[in-house]
Amino acid sequence: MGMESKLMGRPDPLMMRGFGLFINHYLVNRNSCQ
């Protein structure tokens, strides 16, 4: 998860939280489909 800080120069809490929610949503959907 170090790419965001390299691109923006500083970690963005809102971006990190949104990315975490997106990953969590993706994992839940993938698990429910199987």
Image: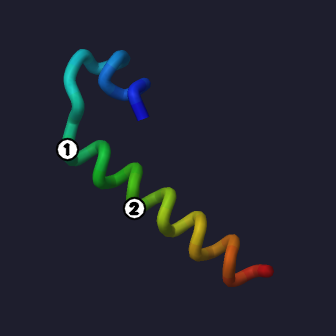
User: What amino acid type should be assigned to the residue bearing mark 2?
Assistant: Leu
Residue in the image at 51% along x and 68% along y: 25
Left or right of 5? Residue 27 is right
Quadrant of the image containing the C terminus: bottom right
Secondary-structure class at tag 1: helix
Left or right of 2? Residue 10 is left
For the image, the number of numbered tags is 2
User: Which of the 4 image quadrants contains residue 27?
Assistant: bottom right
Quadrant of the image containing the N terminus: top left
Residue in the image at 40% along x and 50% along y: 19
User: Which of the 4 image quadrants contains residue 26?
Assistant: bottom right
Task: Report how far apart the C-alphas of labels 1 and 2 lie in the structure.
Answer: 12 Å
Sequence-wise, which precedes: disc 1 or disc 2?
Answer: 1
> For the residue carrying disc 2, how many other residues have a C-alpha within 10 Å: few (<14), some (14-19), or many (20+)?
few
Residue in the image at 34% along x and 53% along y: 18
Spot occupied by residue 11 in the image (x, y as percentages of width and height):
23, 31
User: What amino acid type should be assigned to the residue bearing mark 1?
Assistant: Pro
- On screen, 17 above or below 1? below
Secondary-structure class at tag 2: helix
Identify the mark at residue 23; answer none if there is no mark: none
Instruction: Name the residue that disc number 1 marks.
Output: 13
Left or right of 26? Residue 18 is left
The extreme right residue here reads: 34
User: Which of the 4 image quadrants contains residue 32?
Assistant: bottom right
- On screen, 24 above or below 34? above
Instruction: Name the residue that disc number 2 marks.
Output: 21
Spot occupied by residue 30 in the image (x, y as percentages of width and height):
69, 71
